Amino acid sequence: MPTIQFGDVQVEVDEDGFVQDPKQWTEDLARYLAKQEEGLDNLTEDHWKVIHYLRDYYQQFGIAPMIRKLCKDTGFDLKYIYELFPSGPAKGACKLAGLPKPTGCV
Amino acid sequence: MVLPILVAAAFLFSLTALAVRLRPALALRKPDFSRPRGSAAAGVAYAYSIGMLPWTKQSGREHALAYVRGALFHVGIFLSFAVLALTLTPWLAGFPAGQRTGVALFLAVTCLAGLLGLWDRFRQRNLRALSVPEDYTAIVVVAAFVGLAAAAVRWPGLTGLFQAWSAWLLLYLPFSKLRHVWFFFFMRYFYGSHFGHRGVLPHPRMLEAR
Amino acid sequence: MSVQGLSPHGLNLKQFSQEFRAKTGPALLSSLDACVRCGVCAESCHYYQADPRPEHVPAYRAEAVRRILRTQDPWTRWFPGWFGAEPRRGRSDEEMLRALGDVIFGTCTQCRRCTLSCPMGVDTGTIVRTARGVLARHGLIPEGLKATVDAHLKTGNNMAVSREDFLDTLQWMEEQLQSDTGDPQARIPVNKQGARVLYTLNPREVKYFPLTILAAAKILYAAQEDWTFSTEAWDGTNYGLFSGEDDKAAEIARRLEAEAVRLGVQEVVMTECGHGYRSFRWEGPNWLGHPYPFRVRSFVELMAEYLDSGRIKLNPAANSLPVTYHDPCNLARNGGIIEEPRFLLSRAVREFREMTPNGKDNYCCGGGGGMLAMTEYSQRRLQAGQAKARQIAASGARVVVTSCHNCVDQLNELNRHYQLKVKVHNLCEIVADALVLAKAQRPAASGAAAQDA
């Protein structure tokens, strides 16, 4: 199992870069992943809004929300979400939020 | 008289063994329940004809030399079986010496083609990794068969040795990779009908018929 | 590395061999005896193209299975090593089967390109699938692949989308459809009894990428098709194709078949999902052991028919960048759908460029065989996509179009990994953007155009 090192913290990730233990997630880790995985130098307020929404939803329901819910509850339209996270909602946003890799073709 | 009987018996044994080996495959035959998009028959026809031409496949294009060498070896093998059949008749001696020498020389060349394949197996990294011990011995057994056929055509005195070796080859064949001589024809049939049924071979069509 | 899975409880070499042989058909049994290990299949494999090692020669993978089977072959058991049985090297049966698992799950996408290149026609992809099925039955299967099959069987779709969420998303897209077409009567029909067409989806469309649903709905609207979704069976995927478990694959196919029969549709149309199409169109009837009482087609075929018969009209001006098409293995090589996408693109884009090779000879993108669900093989998967990345770069195209959601995901990853600087789209998005609607309402930016913006 690969690990990533940032600062003095070691975090286990799978080979797709998804964090293995959601409890290890911190905002610093999200910033690090944003740079490494998405090439985003800094995360805007809107990025954080999506990330925190995803985490809250996951903690409550144990599954990532539908893109429909994400759009409705954050007030962002679909196009804007795809812009915020170039790798898409699953491999981009969910990964940064420390959610596990979804099943299926993603 | 003992040797020809032995050859015939070995041939019958070989054929029976191969049939037994194939039986489970045929027993498992089921119709393809999916609706056809193309024609299984056209696919089979393609698989046995154009589909065997080396330039129709990437493998043939990238390994043209190996293809030619292999094809030559196999022509020699089938010719050697023809020679074997002739040695069981009185006709072989009736051919003029010049013709017999010509055939012998041709067989010798194909034998060499086979041995070059053996050389490749030693030399190429992929083939070395893929090969099992029997891959080397199978070539030797068959190349010797072709070589002895050449010798028997040229020097009729060696016919006994050729027949004895042929009997051994036929007995060995069903246990060896050499059984591909039999499975090849079935494989091509299944391959052609499968991809023909799906409309992939011989050529795709624009819209499926209703 | 070996497969991380449950212990193959009680599975030994003998049982593996028996179960494998019980599952095989004639083509497969012939594939076991026809291979002469000539090795000319090497270059046909995208793994070998990316990393030319002997282990990446297709015959080597099939041999991994055959070597295990030879340990049990009564014809050669007297001299097993001589005839190429797998040597024990001090390993237990379980260790040997785990090593096999790593080869067959981790280094083959079942694209069957090698079969077309083989002088015999040996079906290595199916050898691999059959062996996967035996191992999977005994718990030796990568977790992500197992979870995807299980989710489908348990929840009716492989991403565990609830009925409410499904309907909510369809309604959302219906509102978009109405606004894009300017027709408040435009509908995305659900559970319509007696509709002509039952349309299926890949759950990733519903969960994350709904614009392809909108694009498909727009095309079906423009063609004035009588179609419907079903809330009971809308997932057209079938990861049983990848896990090799025929019983689970059959159950997934059975549910869709039953729903199509219940609704009384004339045909089931598969979304642009390569393996879903192959599973339901070609393998499903054989898993079930009977033909369907309805027709099954890919949406690509239906779109081509609409265009051919004049039911839709396209304006290529909508897509002005140079476009290339990636043939999904399961549509082209395994289903013969090669001409249709090219016909559609010839009318939907300004400039079309072929990759070389293409059609039935196209290289796999590397994402097939369930690789996207097996995270332990992600690095290998990206590396194996190198041949495809080179093809795309050489085409000079700016947009890569394909007809498989799985390929789209892998191509997007290749795009990033190999810095190809292209856009990747489903064919239906490109077609929807080029649609000329009869009522003269130009479609607002949607589908491909929206994602590009």
Image (tube, coloured by chain):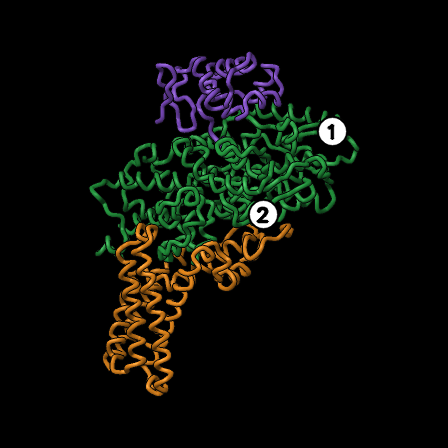
Chain colours: A purple, B orange, C green
Q: Is residue C299 left or right of residue C240?
A: right
In the rendered view, would you say C416 is above or below C16? above
Tell me if B172 is positioned left or right of A96 in this view: left
Mark 2 falls on what kind of element?
Answer: loop
Whether residue C164 is visible: no
Within 10 angstroms of label 2, few (less than 14), some, or many (20 or more) residues?
many
**Which element type, helix, strand or loop, lies under badge 1?**
helix
Subunit bearing disc 1: C
Amino acid type of the residue that numbered disc 2 sits on in the rendered structure: Ile
**Front-lying residue, B14 or C330:** C330
Q: Are marks 2 and 1 on the same chain?
A: yes
Q: Looking at the rendering, which quadrant does residue C296 occupy?
A: top right
Q: Residues within 10 Å of mark 1 (few under 14, many from 20)?
A: many
In the picture shown, does residue C392 fall above or below C176?
Answer: below
Considering every residue shown, the one lying at the far left of the view is C90
At horizontal 37% and vertical 71% (from top left) the residue drawn is B76
Left or right of residue C379: residue C330: right
In the picture of the structure, the residue carrying the numbered disc 1 is: C181
Q: Give the quadrant of residue B174.
A: bottom left
Q: Residue at x 56, y 20 (%)?
A: A84
Q: Which residue is mark 2?
A: C337
Residue C161: image location, x then y, percent: 53, 26
Vertically, is C214 above or below B2?
above
Amino acid bearing label 1: Thr
2 and 1 marks in contact (CB < 8 Å): no
